[in-house]
Amino acid sequence: MSDKSAVIVRQNDARVLRAFGLEITILLDGERTGGALTMWTEITPPGGGPPPHYHLNEDETFHVIEGRVAFLLNGDWNEVGSGGTAFMPRGIVHTFKNVGDQPSRMLNMTTPSGFEKFFARCADEFAKPGEPDMSRIVEIGVEHGIHFVQE
């Protein structure tokens, strides 16, 4: 028997967060999955994407639903179109960028969960008036095992 409960999430039950120019809709989080994973959809504007980073605690999977997205891996950019998928294990420096002229949409997942807590705290910082305090964002990242690096 599993110690996890089954869950169904309707669109209206999902939580929308905004940070780094991204809009993410949390579909499954640690609370709903017993810590197993976090899953969300993400809308990224043209040219948008987070700074290069790596995770100490989570593996991250990206599936491009719409648009043109390039992933940075081992210093090289690799473009993936609709239907493409990227897997970034913990410890690997990575990022992505919408290289198209329309917003991109992805379905993303981290295992185990926890990413949603990091992103929610960043969203709070980005929601404050003026430009976000990037040193605070870096601190929040470190507290959650996410480290930003120079390209």
Image: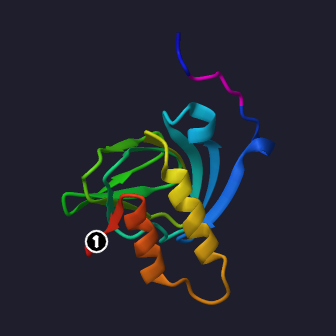
Circle 1: residue type: Val
Residue 102 drawn at (x, y percent): 58, 63
Q: Which residue is mark 1?
A: 149
At horizontal 63% and vertical 48% (from top left) the residue drawn is 26
- Give the quarter of the figure containing the C terminus: bottom left
Residue 67 drawn at (x, y percent): 52, 54
Tell me the chief SS of the magenta region.
Answer: loop
When asked about the image quadrant of residue 145, the answer is bottom left
Most distant residue in the left direction: 74
Residue 4 drawn at (x, y percent): 57, 23
Most distant residue in the top direction: 1
In the image, the segment drawn in magenta is: 4-8
At horizontal 51% and vertical 36% (from top left) the residue drawn is 35
Residue 103 visible in the snapshot? no
Q: Does dot 1 land on a helix, a strand or a loop?
A: loop
27 or 66: nearer the viewer: 27
Residue 5 lies in the magenta-colored region: yes
When asked about the image quadrant of residue 9, the answer is top right
At horizontal 52% and vertical 71% (from top left) the residue drawn is 20
29 or 45: nearer the viewer: 29
